[in-house]
Image (cartoon, helix red, strand yellow):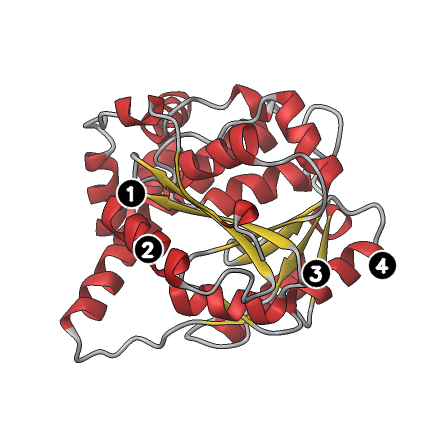
């Protein structure tokens, strides 16, 4: 994570405030905070705040930031913790928003890694939002707050849900699906990640878990599409958890579920796991602020 913050510092303007949300890993949050506290005051362009969230869940992390931590002003950049943004990435996102004033958000495009070329081509062709790097206008975030959008806890494809809501202009009952209109593509905004090595056990385990989460993500996507595109239901009425989201879709369209499960054993295992709801009580614990660089004298 520290390497990602170093890359962000190289891409950011002086005075930029960055909130670092560490979810479900109190030791990592403490270590990052200690490293930042030991750095010389005012030594970099970023004013960093480090928050520790008890629940290890990306959707909860998004919900807490948007509804509790977002300061309420300015374009906001969403960057995954393992991503090293390139030096001109943030400016490219801002330029894309300036060039397309009707857009609610701007998305960076992948340029390295397995599948990056195919995904980039798909985004160029169809539009969309990439979770590793994108930006939302302040007006967009105010609208999401006002409408009360909260992502279902446990969803893997958080960017897929946010991108879908944006693609419907925030209201599927009133607007058609237009991702190219509502999400500007910042073609020069990209990032790097640490390459995985097939001979490292940790990388193999990470890839195995990612494949499992992607299988669940397929079921999530079908359920969200059914909710927004088929039934035109309001996004803010999405079920509170991924278990409830997918179960409602399965009950309403069992044939679609059966077809999805028949295609992939991982999807069947994901469906089985979703039959055992998780304990989400940790979501009630507020974020803990461990480090506040905005109050460090320069």
Instruction: Between label 1 and label 3, give the one nearer the viewer.
Output: 3
Residue 258 screen position, x and y as percent: 31, 36
Say which label, 1 or 2, has the lower sequence index: 2
Which callout, 3 or 2, points at the residue further toward the start of the chain?
A: 2
Which is more N-terminal, label 3 or label 4?
A: 3
Which of the 4 image quarters holds residue 73?
A: top right
Mark 1 or 4, which is nearer the eye?
4
Task: Tell me the mark number nearer the camera, choosing from 1 and 2.
Answer: 2
Task: Measure how far apart labels 4 and 3 are at the Cα level.
Answer: 10 Å
Q: CA distance from mark 1 to mark 4?
A: 42 Å
In the picture, the quarter occupied by the N terminus is bottom left
- Proximity of marks 3 and 2: CB atoms separated by less than 8 Å: no
Q: CA distance from mark 4 to mark 2?
A: 40 Å
Q: Which residue is mark 3?
A: 93
Name the spot of residue 201 as percent of width and height, x first. 14, 71
Residue labelled with disc 1: 261
Q: Farthest residue to the front: give it.
A: 297
Q: Looking at the image, which residue is at 23% across and 28% down? A: 278
Q: Position of residue 209 (x, y in %)?
A: 24, 55
Under tag 2, what secondary structure? helix
Read off the residue under disc 2.
Answer: 34
Please indicate whether residue 204 sits to the left or right of residue 145 in the image.
left
State whether residue 191 is above or below residue 297: below
Tell me where residue 95 appears, x and y as whole percent: 79, 62
Tally of numbered tags: 4
Q: Name which of mark 4 and mark 2 comes first in the sequence.
A: 2
Q: Are the residues flagged by discs 1 and 3 in contact, CB closer than 8 Å? A: no
**Residue that numbered label 4 is attached to:** 99
């Amino acid at each position: 994570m520290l390497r990602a913050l170093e890359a962000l510092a190289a891409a950011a303007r002086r005075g930029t405030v960055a909130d670092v949300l560490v979810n479900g890993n109190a030791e990592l949050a403490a270590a990052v905070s200690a490293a930042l506290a030991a750095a010389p005051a005012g030594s970099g362009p970023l004013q960093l705040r480090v928050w520790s969230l008890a629940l290890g869940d990306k959707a909860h992390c998004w919900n807490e930031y948007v509804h509790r931590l977002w300061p309420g002003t300015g374009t906001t950049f969403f960057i995954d913790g393992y991503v090293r943004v390139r030096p001109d990435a943030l400016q490219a996102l801002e330029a894309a928003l300036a060039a397309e004033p009707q857009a609610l958000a701007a998305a960076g495009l992948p340029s390295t890694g397995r599948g990056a070329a195919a995904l980039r081509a798909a985004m160029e062709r169809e539009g969309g939002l990439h979770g590793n790097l994108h930006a939302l206008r302040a007006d967009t975030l105010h609208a999401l707050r006002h409408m009360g959008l909260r992502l279902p806890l446990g969803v893997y494809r958080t960017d897929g849900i946010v991108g879908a809501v944006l693609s419907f202009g925030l209201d599927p009952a009133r607007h058609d699906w237009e991702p190219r209109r509502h999400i500007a593509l910042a073609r020069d905004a990209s990032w790097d990640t640490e390459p995985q090595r097939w001979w490292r056990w940790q990388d193999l385990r990470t890839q195995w878990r990612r494949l499992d989460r992607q299988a669940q993500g397929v079921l999530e996507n079908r359920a969200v599409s059914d909710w927004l595109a088929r039934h035109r239901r309001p996004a803010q009425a999405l079920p509170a958890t991924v278990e409830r989201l997918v179960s409602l879709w399965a009950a309403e369209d069992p044939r679609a579920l059966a077809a999805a499960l028949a295609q992939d054993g991982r999807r069947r295992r994901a469906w089985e796991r979703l039959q055992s709801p998780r304990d989400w009580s940790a979501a009630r614990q507020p974020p803990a602020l461990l480090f506040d660089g905005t109050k460090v004298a320069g």
